[in-house]
Amino acid sequence: MENIPYKIYLAENELPTAWYNMRADMKTKPAPLLNPGTHKPLTAEEMSGIFCEELVAQELDDTTAFIPIPQEIRDFYKMYRPSPLVRAYCLEKQLGTPAKIYYKFEGNNTSGSHKLNSAIAQAYYAKKQGLKGVTTETGAGQWGTALSMACAYLGLDCKVYMVKVSYEQKPFRREVMRTYGASVTASPSMETEVGRKILAEHPGTTGSLGCAISEAVEVAVTNPGYRYVLGSVLNQVLLHQSVIGLETKAAMDKYGIKPDIIIGCAGGGSNLGGLIAPFMGEKLRGEADYRVIAVEPASCPSFTRGKFAFDFCDTGKICPLARMYTLGSGFIPAPNHAGGLRFHGMSTTLSQLYHDGYLEARAVEQTSVFKAAEQFARVEGILPAPESSHAIKVAMDEALKCKETGEEKTILFGLTGTGYFDLKAYESYNDGTMTDYIPTDEDLAVGFASLPPVPEYD
C-alpha cells in the first residue's frame, strides 16, 4: 500500500476563499440566455425579476476568474467542509486493477449531497436582498432538501415543487424538507396555471424537472418578495460548486497526485462542473491535460444524443432560452427511470466545453449503474446515490481497462451523495423488476420538433 491516507482532509485554513469561474478562461464563451419573446440576450434588469440581483451578476460574469466567498457562507461551509478525498483502496483490490482510484465524497451532510454548496449561497443572497422567500423545483430531492436546510438556517420561506414520480417514491425525502420548514408540492399540480395546463395536455403524467421549473418560476414571479433559485444548469450554480474541485485539487497537490481521468455524473451539470472546475481551468490555459468524462443515463441522454441548440429550460416554456445540449423541453423520462439526472438539457458552460472537445460523454443503462453501486457499497462502505453511481460505473470500467493494459492511471470521480432516500430504486434492482429504457430515435424526434427557431444565432 502506498503512503497515501485513506482519507485526505484539508485544514480549515486551506479551504477555498473564492469560487472559480471557468468561463473566464474559455476562449469561446457560452451563448447568453435569451428572452423567449424577443430572442435577444437577457439583460440584468430582466433577469432580476426572476433571480436575486447578486446571483444575476454572477450569472452574467464571463471575465472574473475568482469571486470571493462571503464570510457567512464560509462559516456555514465549515459545518460540513472540507469533505474528504478518499482513496478507494478496497475497490482497487477487488477489481484487481493497477489503477489508482480516488473519489471526492460530498454526502457528509444532512441533505446527503453536494447541493448544499449552492443552496446556502443562493439563500444568503436572497436574505441579503431582503426577500421573504424563494421557490424551486427538485427531482430526486437532494436540491429541495439542501435548499430547505439553507432557508431554515437563514429564516427564509421555501416553496418546493417536486417531480411527481419522486414525490410518490421518496416520501422520506419529502418529510426531511418539511421538517426544515419547506412546503412541498407534487408537480405538475393544480396550484399554478402552467401546472393545470400541463395536466390538461398530459393527464396522469409523472412529471419532469421541466414541469416543476415552470411551476416554481410562475409562483416566484407572481408573489412579491420571492425569487426563483435553481440547483443546477446555471452558471452561478457551477460557480458555487467549484468549491468541490478547488478542495479536491488542493488535497491532491498536497500529496503530489495528478489525475489522468476525471469522471462525474451529468444531469444538469452542477456536480460535474464543480468537480472539474480548476482542472478544466488548467486545461483551458494549456497548463495541463486531463481526460474528462461526463456520464449520463441512457434514458435521458442529453449529451450523447441531444442537439446543441437554443431551447427552453422548462416544459411550460416561460423560462429563458439557453443554448445547450438538449432533448427538447417537452422530453419526459420514462416512469421506470430511477437513477436521477432527469433534466432534458445540460449546463450552457458544459455544453460549450463538450462542443469544443474539452470533455467527452458516455451514456449508461440504469441496471448496470445499480450493479456498480452495490459492488461499490459492499467494499467501500458507502451506499451511493443513484446519480453518483453513474460515475462509479464508468470509473470501474476505466479501472478494468487499466487491468487489461497494465496502465497505472489515476482516476478521480465525484461521489455526489448517499442513497439512503433512494431505497425504492435499490429495492426494484434487488427484486429484479428494474428495467432499462432507451428512447428510440422516434421518441427523441418528438422533443427535437419543438425546439424554437432562433435564426439570428443559427
Image: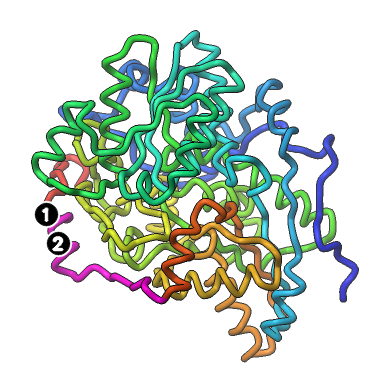
Is 43 in front, or is 100?
100
Helix, strand or loop at mark 1: loop
Q: Which residue is mark 1?
A: 449
Decide: marks 2, 1 in contact (CB < 8 A)?
yes
Tell me where the magenta segment starts and ends, as one range: 432-449
Question: Disc 2 marks which amino acid?
Answer: Ala
Residue 236 vertical placement versus 225 (above, below): below
78 magenta-colored? no
Farthest residue in the right direction?
Answer: 3
Amino acid found under the numbered disc labelled 1: Ala
Provide the residue designation for mark 2.
Answer: 445
Where in the figure is residue 206, as x and y percent of width and height? 25, 49
Where is residue 38, by image quadrant?
top left
Q: Is disc 2 surrounded by few (<14), some (14 to 19) or many (20+) residues within 10 Å? A: some
Q: Residue at x 15, y 44 (%)?
A: 452
At horizontal 33% and vertical 43% (from top left) the residue drawn is 163
- What is the CA distance from the residue labelled 2 to the residue labelled 1? 6 Å
